[in-house]
Amino acid sequence: MLHVDIPTLPEIQTLVAQRNRASVSIYLETTPQTQRIGEAGIALSNLIKEADTQLEKAGIDKRERWAIVEQLEEVSEDEDFWKYQANSLAVFATPDSHRSYRLPNKLKNMVQVADRFHLKPLIRAVSVEQHAFVLALAENEVRVIEVFSDMPPAEIKVANMPRDAASAVGTATVNTRSHSSGRQHGSEGQKVYLRKFCRMVDAALRPMLSGRHEPLILAATEPLKSIYRSVNTYPELASQMIETSPVRVPEHELAAAARPILDQRHESSIEEFKALYHERENEGRATTDIATAARAATFGAVDTLIVDIDEVVNGMIDEQTGEVTFSDPAGADSYGIVDEIAGRTLAMGGKVIGERKTDIPGGGSLAAVLRYAL
């Protein structure tokens, strides 16, 4: 199982707002395979050295540098921490504090020093679904399969999960006519049993899914699929489902059926954005211009922003006016402008999507849909 702790929106907003001239952002590719995690630890040690070098070049005082390095080395040397990883690790440190997040998607190793954190790779992690759970639900079995983008699927043992419908409700079979007299009552009795069974499944899933954002994809047939959907309490239950009996279906087949659903969900969200962008463009409420987007984000005018996660445009944005000053090459006194626009959008309650350039209207660094025309 991937051990992820993706930041919530309030946590991202806190990171966005934080300012310290010695802010270190580290992204590191890791692995949930414990036997291979040593490579990631070595890579982190090298990135810590690089961060220290950048801090020194930026003129950061030795005591502040040591405070940062000490915190980062604590992460590097924590053996218990390294036992439970995902596909990437993001670490943000200042002389006073540090935070780390284990992420499901693979990110390139990098370190950046500025007066604020570099958050665009983190935004990609929370905006693109590459990790999901399949609930294989039938009267005679219940399984939860974790689906990864580039690893074999794995069944998860969920505490207090009922084995099957009959044992869950304390009867020999949920299909018996003895529940009540008459054909209609017998059918209604079966639904009562199955509804109770589905509520127990949902209750068992709650602790495992608490605080998570990955989609839960249901694999079931009627009447269970409709009954479960009616009692489900997990907000990320996918509207699309695997409409087949999952009984004795191998994990890899369920995962293969789930991946197109993830792709479809993502493609739909991008197409919806593009359609909205072109509609708002005709109304003067959309832009691909960095300077315009920076001003709009500063004044809370950006509703939805899509950004290129790979490109870094260096410079600064005035805190009050949103005016852009471009800077080349990069330095500790500058930062990623698009990253900052994304941060200001999130801070003002807007939505940010991290994507590749080919999916951005106009093929530029960003595209923004505005709440009102500037």
Image: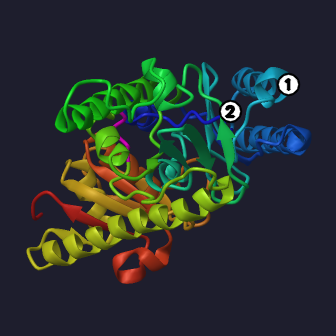
Q: Quadrant of residue 42?
A: top right
Please report the residue visible at 69 percent of the width from the left and 45 percent of the height from the top. Answer: 154
Assign the C terminus to one quadrant of the image.
Answer: bottom left
Q: Quadrant of residue 269?
A: bottom left
Please report the residue visible at 48 percent of the width from the left and 43 percent of the height from the top. Answer: 138
Range drawn in magenta = 233-237
Secondary structure that dominates the magenta span: loop
| Residue 323 shows up from this direction | yes
Q: What's under tag 1, amino acid-wise?
A: Glu
Q: Is residue 334 magenta?
A: no
Q: What is the number of the mark on residue 77?
A: 1
Characterize the local packing of mark 2: few (<14), some (14-19) or many (20 or more) Cα atoms within 10 angstroms: some
- Taking depth in this image into account, of 264 and 65 the one nearest to the observer is 264
Please report the residue visible at 76 percent of the width from the left and 41 percent of the height from the top. Answer: 32
**Count of numbered labels shown in the rendering:** 2
Left or right, 252 with reference to 354: right
Separation of disc 1 and disc 2 at Cα? 24 Å
**Residue under label 2:** 60
Assign the N terminus to one quadrant of the image.
Answer: top right
Q: What's under tag 2, amino acid-wise?
A: Ile
